[in-house]
Image (spheres, rainbow, N blue to C red):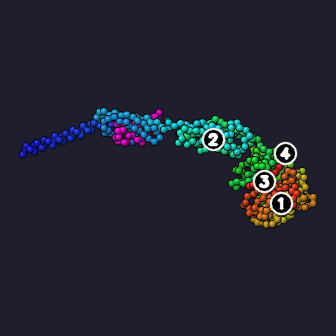
Amino acid sequence: MKNIFKILFILLVISGLSACREEQVEKAEKGFLKGKVVKRGSNEPVSNAKITTAPTSTTVFTDTDGSFEITDIPLGDYSVKAELSGFLANYQAANLQNPGQVVTIVFEMEDDESLNTAPSQPELISPVDNAENQPLSVELTWKSTDPDEDDVLVYSLIVKNDQNTDVVEVADLKEAAYTLKDLKFGVSYFWQVSVTDGIHDAVLSPVYKFTTSKTPNNRYHFVRKENGNYFIISSDESGSNSFRFTDTSFNSWRPRKNNNAGLIAFLRTEGGSPHIFTAKPDGSEVFKVTSIPLGGFNNIELDYSWSTNGKEFLYANFDKLYRINKDGSGQQLVYTTPDGSMITEVDWSYDNSKIAVKTNDYNGYKVKIYVIDMLGNVLNTVLADTAGAAGGLNFSVDGKQLLFTHDVSGYQDSNYRQLNSHIFIYTLADNTIRDISDESDKPNGTNDLDPRFSPNNAQVIFTNTSNDGISQKNILSIDLNTTDEELTRTTLFENAEMPDYE
């Protein structure tokens, strides 16, 4: 019996030794795989790259220093793969032949862009290079191609000119087109486009050039409003050559063209007060004439006058009337109202011998319209202490007639609202008054405002609008030569007011 137990014990010991030997052999038949992943060219470590093998073993990711390690990998031949978004996948061979062997691999990974093609150089479509007589609004178009269909092309534009150092820069354009607006007449513009696909450096186009047309001899000027500011439009009768004469960043109104001076005058707010400015017909070389501002009960109602020869202005500051040279020199007091009323509007006759004056109180009412000579003597009284708003003074070329407006409803309120303003022609020789609004069948509920004689006295141009105070204003004309019983009214410009026609 003892012999049997000895035999069993010996067998158990032998079996255990055999198992240990097999385990040691199994461990000894494995190796180690380690390495590093870097960016090709710079050798910067690539972290978080995924490392896999074929045949499959353990999947690992690189550390912050780009290193990795796979332990206890069975002996054999392997294809080791390193991959990471934004890089091309990289493969290396590894051969583990001996137990406990350590194989080291270095991956040099390339950016995806190495297989990406840069976009083509932007090519001009329009306007053609060196194009001339271009309008003041020009659409620039070009094209660029990219063989990589998934790439998104983004453009940048830079524009310079030959008149000043202004530079226009437009970035992040998704379309191969851009419209330049509010250009200046007679100016050459130089423009260049760059394109990028977000992978390669920007590709530049050649520098292209176009030149705008010369300043047209526009005879109409009027006012529009945008973002709370008035701005002036210069236009021909058809509107085909219209352009913004003043910038919308300023509050500018009451344009007055003088052909002898070759300039256009207007009012502009500076420091909260209105002043007379002049500029060339293209809107350049803006010059401030006045140092003492215009003053009255309402800045927008103020008006001034320019001498026919273009050398002097007449304007008012409350109860005082001044004359001043167009270069800002020689200012002198011409007239002071005897009752302290405010002078809101003036007009100088073509021969500079007479001045039409409109006065009112601090609310714009108690209106008087009269004509004085250059010594201040009253020659004609047109209106005197009449209820309702009035204004719109303008002499005919021969100085024999005077345009004015009057709200025949006689309505008065704190907002200076007018309910039924008509245009009248006053004849100085016989003191007769003609209501041309009535003769032209003015629509009910509207006001006729700011009238001006045409250069040949055959027409009157003016503003018409609803008396609600918020509706659109339009510029119309009344033909004084109409043979029919009713005078003809014609719309000239929509969304426009304060016309000037020279």
Residue 16: percent from left, percent from top = 18, 42
| Label 3 Cα neighbours within 10 Å, binned few <14 / some 14-19 / many ≥20 | some
Foreground label between 4 and 3: 3
Query: Residue, x 87% and y 59% (percent of image)?
Result: 484
Residue visible at 90% across and 58% down in the picture? 427
> Which label sits in the foreground, 4 or 1?
1
- Which quarter of the picture shows residue 321? bottom right
Residue at horizontal 85 percent and vertical 50 percent from the top: 455
Please report whichever mark, 3 or 1, sits nearer to the chain's N-terminal start: 1
Give the extent of the magenta segment: 33-60
Q: Earlier in the sequence, mark 2 or mark 4?
A: 2
Per the image, label 2 sits on a secondary structure element best described as strand
**Marks 1 and 2: CB-CB under 8 Å?**
no
46 inside magenta stretch: yes
Mark closer to the chain start, 1 or 2? 2
SS for callout 4: loop
Q: Secondary structure at mark 3?
A: strand
261 relative position to 85: left or right: right
| Mark 2 or 4: the one toward you | 2
Residue picked out by circle 4: 260
Q: Earlier in the sequence, mark 4 or mark 1?
A: 4
Q: Residues within 10 Å of mark 1 (few under 14, many from 20)?
A: some
What residue sits right under mark 3 in the picture? 492
